[in-house]
Image: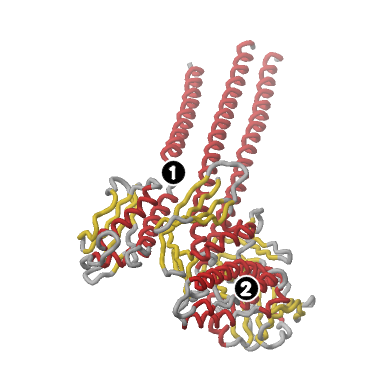
Amino acid sequence: MDLIKKPKTKAQFSIQFAWIFILIAGAIILIFFISLVYKQKEISEIKLSATVLSQIETILTGAGLSPGTVNLIDMPETQMNFICDAEGFSEFSIKGTSLTKATPVQVVFAPDTVQGKRLITWALSWDTPFKVTNFLYLSDLNTKYILINPNYEVEKDFPEEFEPSIKSSLDGIQTKGLNKIRIVYFNSQPDMLPEQMQSRNLDVSAIQVTPGTVSFYKRTKDRQGFELEGSIPYIDMPSLYGAIFSQDLTFYECNMKKAFKHLNHVSEIYAARESSIEDYFLTHPTVQDCHIYYHNKIQDLVSDSANCSQDIRLCISSIDVGAIKDNQETLIRKSCPLIY
Amino acid sequence: MKISKKTAQVKMFETIAVLVVFFVLIMFGFMFYTKIQKGSFEEAREENLILKAIDTSQKISFLPEFQCSRDNIQEENCIDMLKLDAAEQVINKNKLDYVETFGFSRVYIQEVYPSQDEWNLYDLPKQEDKGKISTQFPISLYNPLTDTYSFGVLFVDNYR
Amino acid sequence: MKNYKKSQTEIMGLAIIIILVSLAMLFVIQFIILKQPSDIKKTFTHKELAANTVNTLLSTTTDCRELSVSQLLNDCAEGGYTRCPVGFSCDYVEIVIQEILQQTLEQWSKQHYLTVKINNEEVIPPLGDPCKGEKTTSSPCCILPTSYAPMKINLDICG
């Protein structure tokens, strides 16, 4: 009897051990492959984000090179964050990744977040009076621009790709599917917000445009109205549009400082160029006496732009391009080499 | 009993041997895969550097610091010689502001015809010298004083 | 006997696995070795180089009465009667183009072939040697209108 029992017990034991062994080995193999798959998934996501970042950088460069154009760009569903702060630190990044791209030179006016499958870009040449750089304006389809009693120029120029609402009041505005609303008041004060714009999930901000000045407003804590954040001068239409597209006053100011820094470099080059032309005609006189028509007005622009790149509130009113333009007109009439 | 013990041992050994071989194969496969990935990363890096060189040369020809213009109408594929003279100094004085545009590269322009002039606009080498990728870009050089065009070449050497 | 068949089956199984793995590795190796390196730079830069060289060449001002290369080519196509520091417009423009190409494409070891034609008739003799293998052309760039027919200036960069 014992002899029969022993092999049966031994067999039972060996089967159990075999199964335990199978389970452990199987579990180890499964864990190994599953962790490999997750690691690959992570790497692929990082790779995709890096590709998206690099493509967006190329798109921004390309869009910035073609002024006057509006582009609708399809991209993977991502959220991009834009930063331009009071210290001049400027970058954009893809949410959820550590991938960032510094933009110390590019002038990009955008909300703090741009998300969705479509990016809208608009580029305008900034001329003061010669071309300095291109301003790039970015947005998405989830951001609404409401223009209250805009002037003719803005109404005509504002691209329809941004789907602006041109109205005399905030009545009847649909907010479904929107993440952000930017209200632009032309010559009127911001008023109380209708109920649908008081939602906590909606980022509503406003600016008030008066001749030469733009005031930034943020929503009050009770979300029913607006409180003034600050006012800042603007010098031309491209910079006004910059205020419309900027997230807030700080963002706008930071980008304008970048623009003025670039203006400083470009105007320095033009000033030296004008000086060379004047010196040449002093030693090579012409029938038209060209040398008497170079008045070095650009030199004032060099110092003003240097000041503006530090603090634009103090200097912007002193920027005078009229004198340079008049000088240019004279040179055209006299058939002398132009300043720009 | 002895035979079944030995059979069991052989079977165990066989199972373990299969597992060992399996894991060795997996290991080889993984090493191979990692090597290929490393190779493709290197290739991607090289390609990115090449694209950066092309990108830089394209940007330069559109920069207002260099580009020819007549009454603010920009002329393509043209650099103003008087601007070049001034740009040399301005860019070197404000090098940090141009790092984003030019990166680690050397940018210079040579006049080929009729004269042989050279302008060194920018140079920011890397600490380690790992060579460079050169791009040449024929470009017109305009002299506003004589209203003439010279044949120039824009060189962009991107450091690896 | 049963045991023999069982172990034979098992060994067959192992052999099949090894064959499958070897085949897979063979495919992978083949893919890696035969994959062509990206020549994005070459394609783009040769195209840009060809087109930009011709564009820049055409706008270059020469010492022949301060006429540009395109103006001299036009004059050459219409008879070549303009006197230049060396010969007439046809000879002079050929010298200028030759000089520029020598200091640029030839110095960069880029084999090239430049032709200037009106209705397939050469305006000036071709410069360089025709490309034998791969080439990048400046076309469709660079067509100059003349009083007869459009003048096509074509630059091929070999390789």
Horizontal placement of A265 versus C146: left or right? right
**Residue B67 vertical placement versus A232 (above, below):** above
Q: Please name the residue shown 59% across and 87% down the image.
A: A151
Q: Which mark is residue C69?
A: none
* Cα–Cα gap, marks 1 and 2: 52 Å
The chain carrying label 1 is C
Q: Which x, y percent locates residue A125?
A: 54, 73
Quadrant for residue A114, please give it: bottom right
The answer to which of C71 and A83 lies nearer the viewer is: C71
Amino acid type of the residue that numbered disc 1 sits on in the rendered structure: Pro
Q: Please name the residue shown 51% across and 69% down the image.
A: A72
**Residue B96 vertical placement versus C131 (above, below):** below
The answer to which of C2 and A22 lies nearer the viewer is: A22
Helix, strand or loop at mark 1: loop
Helix, strand or loop at mark 2: helix
Quadrant for residue C117, please give it: bottom left
Q: Residues within 10 Å of mark 1 (few under 14, many from 20)?
A: few
The answer to which of A89 and B20 lies nearer the viewer is: A89
Q: Which x, y percent locates residue B24?
A: 57, 28
Judging by the rendered image, the residue that carries numbered circle 2 is A299
Judging by the rendered image, the residue that carries numbered circle 1 is C37
State the residue lying farthest toward the top.
B2
Horizontal placement of B139 versus B22: left or right? left
Residue mark closest to the camera, 1 vs 2: 2
